[in-house]
Amino acid sequence: MRRLMKILMLSVVTLGIMIGTLFIPKKVDSYEEIEAIPLGYPFPFWIQNMERITPDGFPREYRIGNPWEDPWHVVWSVFAASFAVVLCALLLIEKLFLLLINRLGQIVLKRRNKKY
């Protein structure tokens, strides 16, 4: 039950991270690229059309636009792959952090036992 709860919590954090990556600016070099701007990391899963905006010049940086004004779609297979990569990275970071804390605890106990 604890493992399931931990994975559920890390999944919520993963979803938050992935939504946050949509706000990272993406460089666009031509008007043709405005038709399908790939957003999201580690793999671009959100494709948005920003043709309603006529830029003064290129290159230009865009981040996620208003979903009600700019057409968009999600590539769900890429979203799932991105989700899996981020979740695995968080699980790995958690495991390394716990190993580090455990090792530091052992060092402190050894030093404490030497003093007494």
Image: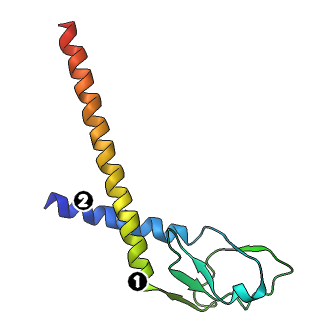
What residue is shown at x 22% (from left), y 27% (from top)? 106
Q: Secondary structure at mark 1?
A: helix
Report the coloring of the rendering.
Answer: rainbow
Q: In the drawing, does residue 35 fall left or right of residue 8?
A: right
Q: Which mark is residue 6?
A: 2
Look at discs 2 and 1 and give the one toward the viewer.
1
Q: Identify whether 64 is placed above or below 107.
A: below
Residue 26 % position (x, y): 66, 72
Residue type, mark 1 in image: Ser
Q: Nearer the viewer, residue 69 or 111?
A: 111
Instruction: Where is residue 67? Give x, y as percent.
Output: 57, 86
Residue named by callout 1: 77
- Residue 113: name its quadrant: top left
Q: Quadrant of the C terminus?
A: top left
Given the image, on which type of amino acid does mark 2 rest?
Answer: Lys
Return the residue found at the far left: 1
Element at badge 2?
helix
Looking at the image, residue 17 lies above or below residue 79: above
Mark with earlier residue (2, 1): 2
Instruction: In the rendered structure, find residue 98 and report the number of the disc placed on it.
Output: none
